[in-house]
Amino acid sequence: MLWLSPFSPIIQASSNQTYWDFIMVRRSHQFSESRDTGGRPVICGRRRHAGVFRNALLGYLAAMVIVVSPVPALAQAAEQAPVQLIKPAGNDRIVARLIAQLMPKNHISARGLDDTISKRALALFTKSLDPLKLYFYQSDIDEFNRDASRIDDMVQQGDLSLAYKIFGRFIQRVDERVAVAQELLNGDFDFSKDEAIVVDPDVAQYAKTPAAAKDRWRRQIKYALLDLKDEGKVGEEAVDTLRRRYGRYARRWKKTDSDDLLEMFLTSVTNGYDPHSTYMSPSTLEDFQIQMSLNLDGIGAQLREKDGNTVVSRVIPGGAAAKHGKLKSDDVIVTVGQGKSGDSVDIVEMPLSDVVDLIRGKAGSTVRLGVKPGGVGNVEEYKIVRATIALEESAARGEIINHKNPDGGKDLKIGYINLPSFYLDMDAARRDEKNFRSSTRDVRRILDDFKTKGVDGIVLDLSKNGGGSLTEAINLTGLFIDSGPVVQVKNSDGSVQAYADEDSGTAWNGPLAVLTSKFSASASEIFAGAIQDYKRGLVIGDPATHGKGTVQTLMNLGQRLFGNNRQNYGALKVTLQQFYLPDGQSTQLKGVLSDVILPSLTAKMDVGEGDLKYALEHDTVPVARHNLYSMVPADLVNKLRKKSAERVEVDEDFADLLRRVEIYVDQKDQETVSLEEEAFLARRKELDSQKEEEDELEQQIEDAVIFRENYYNSEVMNIVADYIDGLRKENLAKAN
């Protein structure tokens, strides 16, 4: 099946292929951190917000594991023997060789696994382990680079020795740095000293000596202590928090299993081709299939980690925990047991992904949770019967907004649809089940309901939609156009094929607005771009969407090896095509441009395709002939822009947003941060002044509200109301 985003399926090519267009976010071994989860405060500079919101977008049911990035430790002699940890599993060599065969044959570049890909893979792998250059010495990197051009040959032979050598050295360095950190925490720190810490990974340098590594960690600890002070933790409480944090970080890495390491290493190889080609381990593949089906067996709770504890973020309405009635947000789970009685497992300090594995289980079975309500007091045991959870908040949802015209005109009923992804229950569709779940079916149902209630126009919100099934993008577009080409796809041989909506008729032929942001990717861009090329509807939002114009196929490795899916060997997600809009433009790097632009923080975040390593280039193909509607007259668009700009200019909330955006842009581009206490806290105060905007966005992503009443959405509705009014005046309120 074909996908176009962080994950999504499309056109059935064969029984074991699914094409996608998503921007995949990987599992818990890619440790990230945030202030809210007790992690080190975000000194990743310009990448900070990308990680926070990307995790939020895909982080349901404990898919988002937030762990702190440790603080340095004492550098022992570089010649110390590497730590001996995990060994490759029996199937790992087979998987590596298969990936080496499949990539050149299927990637759109038709490029062989060569020395250039090898060098990229090495750089990506070491960066995935040590993104801030806190652990490795420069001498380690120099040593690894001597094998930089051998990775292609090694992977083709199934030889994973270099990956294990690098990982062993990394664990050794982590132990050394954590030892230094614990030693430094015994001493005092001078917060009046005028010194700084490098927060830009591209500017940071690997330490060359133990003394340099120790000084780097001294600054890291100062930063962490200042951050904890800003949160109200000082003295021994702050020191104890860091001791536990650093110890936990070292323990976590040592628990990395062969599946996780294989995924990290082989994904570094596939990412050397482009950022969306990845190897998915068996567990990652299972999580992916759950997300696409919108069904999961479990208790129905979102979990997060904070200082080694598993905390309930939210109880999903309608799930087993909600029906049980006792588990609440901010409760801390300390033990997990299986069945109605028996021993329980202590999960304090356990990686969140492992906790999720313990809590998930077959519908109808019982799980026992030892819970501290609100995180305090005695432990209570909750016996919850697992159930199949329909992840309704990840599905299309609609609401009718009664919009009052600020200019005193006629009030309007505007149908608002929130679509988080282009989903499709592939297994149910393959089995030809009558009522299989899909975004197109759900949106059609909502539109039918809206029409019976007499809405004046539709807003389809794709602003938090990272993509999904290409098939669904085509089918959903077909709800709004009569028929015709929706997307063009170019193969590695240069041939171009158009995929069309072939079903005549529409589900909605009235005014349509599509709300987008820089997070709108892949399938979202296909839909928004097709609607724009047909002049069928208005695009509102950030200046441009994400800019992902490639199609991935998901190749089940067990199917490839044995012709069946009885054994899970994971999957290869490989970029095999590029897609183009009906008018021939690629969305790659450039995205879909909005007709009416609104100010936003997301527009300034480094989360676009162009911010990713080794992204493919933008190009064009010939136009695919198609009909044109008259629903977006140029003169009306100009009027809409002018009226919106006038409202935004005098709106106090937008003025405050623009101030926060300016602060954000200034601070994300800083390469260093002062560690002098007064200057640090002043900077933090500025950061906190715009944190409200971040919290608002994360809340929109994670909560159950369909439409949030705020100044931004109010202006979206004002634009849409003006759009409907303008079409009516020109007698264009229906697509012909």
Image (cartoon, rainbow, N blue to C red):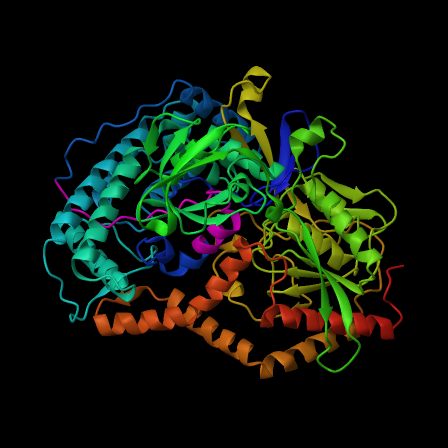
At horizontal 60% and vertical 61% (from top left) the residue drawn is 544
Residue 266 in view (yes/no): no
Residue 52 counted in the magenta span: yes
Main structural element of the magenta stretch: helix, strand or loop?
loop
- The quadrant of the image that shows the C terminus is bottom right
Image quadrant where residue 35 sits: bottom left
Q: Please tell me whether residue 704 is drawn above or below residue 658 in the rendered image.
A: above
Q: Position of residue 176 (x, y in %)?
A: 17, 42
Q: Where is residue 331 in the image (x, y as percent from the top left)?
A: 40, 48
Q: Please tell me whether residue 670 is drawn above or below residue 580 in the rendered image.
A: below
Q: Is residue 530 left or right of residue 560?
A: right
Q: Please tell me whether residue 651 is drawn above or below residue 524 in the rendered image.
A: below
At horizontal 58% and vertical 50% (from top left) the residue drawn is 466
Residue sitting nearer the eye, 535 or 349: 349
Highlighted magenta segment, given as a residue range: 51-76
Q: Is residue 638 left or right of residue 503?
A: left
Q: Position of residue 622 (x, y in %)?
A: 75, 50
Residue 345 counted in the magenta span: no
Residue sitting nearer the eye, 151 or 290: 290
Q: Which residue lies furthest to the left in this view?
A: 187
At horizontal 23% and vertical 47% (from top left) the residue drawn is 244
